[in-house]
Image (cartoon, rainbow, N blue to C red):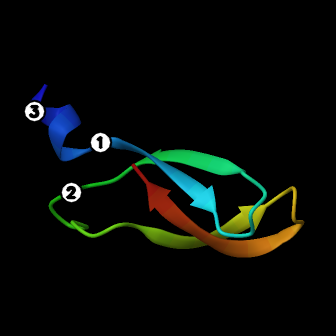
Amino acid sequence: MAATDLRPVIKLRSTAGTGYTYVTRKNRRNNPDRLRLRKYDPIARQHVEFREER
């Protein structure tokens, strides 16, 4: 169980307002803040910022 606490499953939601999400894991020790990544949104058909949602 300790492994799941250190690397929780998170949702990355698109800031384009399409509602598209990616599901990934992150290391809390290396990235304690909310994750922000630029990824492809197939609904908007462009790369947009995705933010971590809890």
Residue identifier under label 2: 28
Give 13 or 4, whichever is nearer the viewer: 13
Q: Are marks 2 and 1 in contact (CB under 8 Å)?
A: yes
Spatial separation of the CA atoms under disc 2 and disc 1: 8 Å
- Residue with the most extreme front position: 17
Q: Is residue 9 above or below residue 15?
A: above
> Residue at horizontal 51%, vertical 66%?
51
- Residue with the most extreme top position: 1
Give 48 or 25, whichever is nearer the viewer: 48
Name the spot of residue 45 as percent of width and height, x first: 89, 66
Q: Is residue 11 above or below residue 3?
A: below
Side of 18 where 35 appears, left or right: left
Under mark 2, the amino acid is: Arg
Residue identifier under label 1: 8
> Residue at horizontal 22%, vertical 33%?
4
Label 3 packing within 10 angstroms: few (<14), some (14-19), many (20+): few
> Residue at horizontal 40%, vertical 67%?
35
**2 or 1: tag closer to the N-terminus:** 1
Side of 36 where 44 appears, left or right: right
Under mark 3, the amino acid is: Ala
Name the spot of residue 1 as percent of width and height, x first: 13, 25
Spatial separation of the CA atoms under disc 3 and disc 2: 12 Å
Give 14 or 23, whichever is nearer the viewer: 14
> Residue at horizontal 87%, vertical 56%?
43
Which quadrant holds residue 8?
top left
Name the spot of residue 29 as percent of width and height, x first: 15, 61
Residue identifier under label 3: 2
Under mark 1, the amino acid is: Pro
**1 or 3: tag closer to the N-terminus:** 3
Label 1 packing within 10 angstroms: few (<14), some (14-19), many (20+): few
**3 or 2: tag closer to the N-terminus:** 3
